[in-house]
Amino acid sequence: MSANAQMATKYKNSFLKEVEEQVEMGEWVKMCMQCGVCSGSCPTNFHPGWEHPPQEIFMMIRAGKREEVLTSPSMWMCTSCYNCIVRCPRKLPITHIMHGLANYAHRLGVAPKMQPTRHFAKLFWNNCVHTGRVNELKLSMGLYFKDGFSQGIKNGMAMKDVALGLLKAKRLNPFELFGGHKCKDQNGIHAMLKKARELEEKRKALKAAA
Ligand code: SF4
Ligand code: SF4
């Protein structure tokens, strides 16, 4: 092995390697040149829950800060607006990496439990994956009642004017609670998701073996 290759191996941080193997598009992290354009372009970076903008997350990965990254609420704040991707001079797929990191933290069971956007993501996924269509009424109810029955009633009462307006405009159908829209080929959706999971497992195995 050449001296340069030995140096590269020596300094290859194990968390960066883990991200490259386990996180969707994680192999792109090393391409970040820390210019900060993504952080400056992110519309949610003023939010108090946005602890570490993408540029900082990528720097922390390269610095081996595994626990800080995986337990950070920041990845769960990404709204997939794609501003960062459009403007990144290195063309990093930042949005995908952020969601990939969130998904990896979730798989490991270390993602912040009280993060409301994480709760929403779980509700949304469970809601739509079953029938292939989102049932908005069930999704809203799940969010209202996430902190218990009495808080759910309070949340519902606080939003009653909005609900009445939606009912009047025929944008809300209470019968959706008992069914709602479904994708015509639900078995096809489930088969597609199963295949996607298999492909993802294969991709990770190939990366780990490389
Ligand atoms: S814009 Fe791209 S290169 Fe610049 S800090 Fe963000 S990810 Fe890195
Ligand atoms: S895609 Fe996510 S990380 Fe990128 S600018 Fe939008 S909110 Fe920020």
Image (cartoon, rainbow, N blue to C red):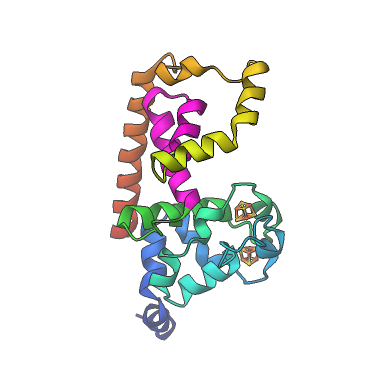
Q: Position of residue 149 (x, y in %)?
A: 39, 39
Residue 140 visible (yes or no): yes
Picture coordinates of residue 158 (x, y %)? 59, 38
Magenta portion: prevailing SS class: helix
Residue 127: say if magenta.
yes
Residue 177, position in %: x, y? 44, 21
Image quadrant containing the C terminus: bottom left
Against 14, residue 128 (above or below) is: above
Number of numbered callouts drawn: 0
- At 59% from the left and 30% from the top, the residue drawn is 160
Along the line of sight, the residue nearer the viewer: 178 or 72: 178
- Which residue appears at 64% of the width and 47% of the height? 81
Residue 131 is one of the magenta-drawn residues: yes
The answer to which of 204 and 128 lies nearer the viewer is: 128
Query: Residue drawn 30% across and 59% down?
Result: 208
From the viewer's perspective, is 175 left or right of 95? left
110 relative position to 161: left or right: left
Part of the protein shown in magenta: 116-144
Residue 14 is left or right of residue 50, and the answer is left
Measuring 46% from the left and 78% from the top, which residue is drawn there? 63
**Residue 46: percent from the left, percent from the top?**
67, 62
Q: Nearer the viewer, residue 92 or 67?
A: 67
Residue 67 placement: quadrant? bottom left
Please indicate, yes or no, whether residue 134 appears anywhere in the rendered image. no
Viewport quadrant of the N terminus: bottom left
Q: Is residue 51 above or below residue 106?
A: below
